[in-house]
Amino acid sequence: MGETTILSWDRPWNRGRTAALLLLALLPNVLGMINLTTPWGFKIHTFQAAIFLAAAVLGPWGGLVSGLAGSLWAALVMANPWLLVGNGILGFCTGLFVRRGFSLLPAVWLAFSIQLLWLIPTDYFLAGLSGAFIRELILALLLSHTCWALVVAPLREPLRRWLA
């Protein structure tokens, strides 16, 4: 038997795991069409839920695939192709931190702090967004990431067992 590393797929691929990866890569595009308006004037994005679930269940590579493929709709609608890489970073790092033993919420927060190293300069210099808008975006993303990490966390183990 080969050794598994932190970056490897932890189980052999089967139809169920392949179907789950495809679903979790496509689902964020559907969820990307849904934004929840808050009383504070900003919107909570929903597509991260599938990215976090893919990262938690399938590891860093599952999170990366879900983050990249799942951001296609948002990148097209917002005319911001840098979203693809940013959400790929978010998914990969979330999966990496979960594999390192972090529970999902701290893993998401750590991954988001790394994603910000990409998000802030690309949104400001390449997408031309204002500093004020980016500050509000960071707050909205932190709240939505926290919300979806809390929603997804209890689903991790049942889904892992089902896909085994």
Image: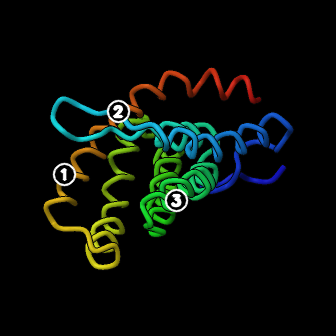
Q: Which of labels 2 and 3 is toward the front?
A: 2
Where does residue 71 sit, x and y in percent of width and height? 53, 55
Q: Which of labels 3 and 1 is toward the front?
A: 1
* Foreground pick, 43 / 121: 43
* Foreground pick, 5 / 37: 37
Secondary structure at numbered mark 3: helix
Q: Residue at x 37, y 60 (%)?
A: 115
- Residue at mark 3: 88
- First of labels 2, 3 by sequence position: 2
Q: Looking at the picture, which amino acid does disc 3 mark? A: Gly
Relative horizontal placement of residue 36, taking residue 30 as reference (left or right): left
Say above or below: 82 vs 158. below
Where does residue 131 sit, x and y in percent of width and height? 16, 66
The residues bearing labels 2 and 1 have C-alpha atoms spaced at a distance of 15 Å
Q: Residue at x 24, y 52 (%)?
A: 138
Secondary structure at numbered mark 1: helix
- Residue at mark 1: 136
Q: Looking at the picture, which amino acid does disc 1 mark? A: Glu
Dot 3, how many residues are within 10 Å of its Cα: few (below 14), some (14-19), or many (20+)?
Answer: many
The residues bearing labels 3 and 1 have C-alpha atoms spaced at a distance of 21 Å
Dot 1, how many residues are within 10 Å of its Cα: few (below 14), some (14-19), or many (20+)?
Answer: few
Q: Looking at the picture, which amino acid does disc 2 mark? A: Leu
Secondary structure at numbered mark 2: strand
Relative horizontal placement of residue 8, taking residue 36 as reference (left or right): right
- Residue at mark 2: 36
